[in-house]
Image (cartoon, rainbow, N blue to C red):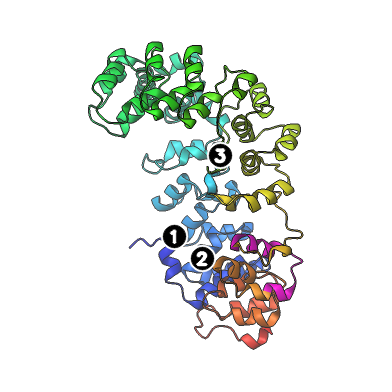
Amino acid sequence: MVKTPERIWEEADLAARRLAGLALNPRTPQDVLLRLLAEGPAAVRMVLCRDRVLPDAVVDAVVEHPDTYTRSFLARNPHVDPAQRVRLIDDPEWFVRAHLADGPRMPFRVRPEPLPDEALVHMIRTYGNDELSGCFYQQISNELLRTMHTHPDAKVRRWGVGAWEWLSADARAALLADPDAGVRDIALLRTREEDPAWVESALPAKPCHARTGILCYQPLTRAVVDSVLTAPAGEDERRMIAYNPSLPTDVVVLLAADPDPEVRERIAYRADLGPAERRALAVDPDPKVRLAVSVHPALSEEERAAIDYEVPTDRGFHHRPAPSVPRDPEDVRRDALSAHPMLRRKAARVHELPPDLVARLADDEDFGVRVTLAQNHPDAPAALLLRGFLEYTGPDRAHLATRPNFPTARLAAFADHEDPEVRALAVRDPETAPAVVERLTGDPDPAVRAAAARHPNLPRPRLAELLDDEELAHPAAANPALDVAEIRRLARTIGDPAGPCVDTLI
């Protein structure tokens, strides 16, 4: 029976959770880590192999470990170097290979670091399609993806067709004439997807995901467009085609006056919107429509300012992976210097934003600009990250605290804050007073309690108590205040239900 990580943890007893804490403790010696790997229960091996950076010697042992689950946890570890994960590339078990290909579970839509190019090519050449069916593509570097179409192995060239939009006409022609039938078929499908007549022949008659995708993004014949306008298969199809870049000019004009404000809003974002339509939508009765047209690239700053738009403040501000094709630097700079907050927010998403614009947008008057910059720029300054965390309470707020420059100094001042996520910041401060840390181990919020249990300033008697606490034994055992001798004593309890001798830790 396949056990999920959640089930493995639920079945772990107090002793196993305590040992799992040792597996995370930065002071745990390598020989103890190896013993935990060799003799620890499933929950301990899971935490050790999945949730921390690992020394090479431990990776060596994991790769040779007889348990399939244990090896698969290393395959999904987001903390280790890809060169360590890829040592499982020829694992005898499909389960492990498939997890390696699917990649680590990254929070907040962060893309994993690519696997080495030579390893990716090896996987494509030797793995079955079922092993490469997950998020494998996210681990392929852009550099490799753009050159795969020239690889001598046909299996690799098939993946190279995925870079079709980047390929020259000569490269596309070569793929269409490829000696491998599979490559030719995939390339032919891409050309057909650019042919409105073929797209019409492939359009499902009833509403479904495939029909939605075609109506939104693929080139449409006039017959398909007219059928949507006169006899749509679903209620939202006028909204769908409003996105479509192949929409004829007269239909753009027609939908710009559509009675549905969502259709008008989507039309307002189109770059091919004419001057008359822009003027009409600029005074549209719906505020969302006016906001959409106010960011149109054809407008001057003066024209934008003349529109009565409202900037939303209730949206989520997320991390977004960098696009495969970077934006034009001049366009980014124009947006960053715009008086329109929505354009400045758009610029703030750019990971490669130059230092002068980072400094400018970090002090922007718009809350959304500041938080977007903090969520996305790798060099977002510490003050901005902290300010964003304190001001923003929407989705992915926790991502801000994972950014490289998030501060740790002077966070103890938040120990009494009413917001538990802000109180938890106090436990990130290495100077938080022992009495405060101890108090926070009894905080009403479980995340605050767990974070406090790992703080090295936690008084020794309280730390000893928590090692026998059903809830907090796990984070307490990960506390770096435990010295090596104490860690070794705790590790001797592997297989001993009696657990540690608490008084030896006081």
Q: Kindly identify the amino acid type of the residue bearing the numbered disc 2.
A: Arg
Q: Quadrant of the C terminus?
A: bottom right
Label located before the other in sequence (3 or 1): 1
Foreground: 106 or 86?
106
Foreground: 309 or 456?
309
Considering every residue shown, the one lying at the far bottom of the view is 503
Q: Is residue 433 one of those drawn in magenta? A: yes
Q: Give the label, 2 or 3, closer to the camera.
A: 3
| Contact, mark 1 vs mark 2 (Cβ under 8 Å) | yes
* Residue positioned 75% across, 34% down in the render: 355
Q: Is residue 202 left or right of residue 95?
A: left
User: Residue 135: x and y, percent?
Assistant: 45, 42
From the image, give the main secondary structure of the stretch colored magenta.
Answer: helix
User: Residue 314: x and y, percent?
Assistant: 53, 44
Q: Quadrant of the N terminus?
A: bottom left
Residue 54: quarter of image: bottom right
Q: Count neighbours of disc 2 (C-alpha within 10 A) and say few if under 14, some if 14 to 19, many if 20 or more.
A: many
Q: Kindly identify the amino acid type of the residue bearing the numbered disc 3.
A: Arg
User: Residue 55: x and y, percent?
Assistant: 64, 58
Residue 462: quarter of image: bottom right
Per the model, the C-alpha gap separating discs 1 and 2 is 9 Å
The disc at residue 45 is 2
Per the model, the C-alpha gap separating discs 3 and 1 is 31 Å
Q: Count neighbours of disc 1 (C-alpha within 10 A) and say few if under 14, some if 14 to 19, many if 20 or more.
A: many
- Relative to 8, say whether 126 is above or below: above
Label located before the other in sequence (1 or 2): 2
Q: Is residue 442 one of those drawn in magenta? A: no
The disc at residue 18 is none
Foreground: 212 or 456?
212
The disc at residue 320 is 3
Q: Give the extent of the magenta segment.
A: 420-437
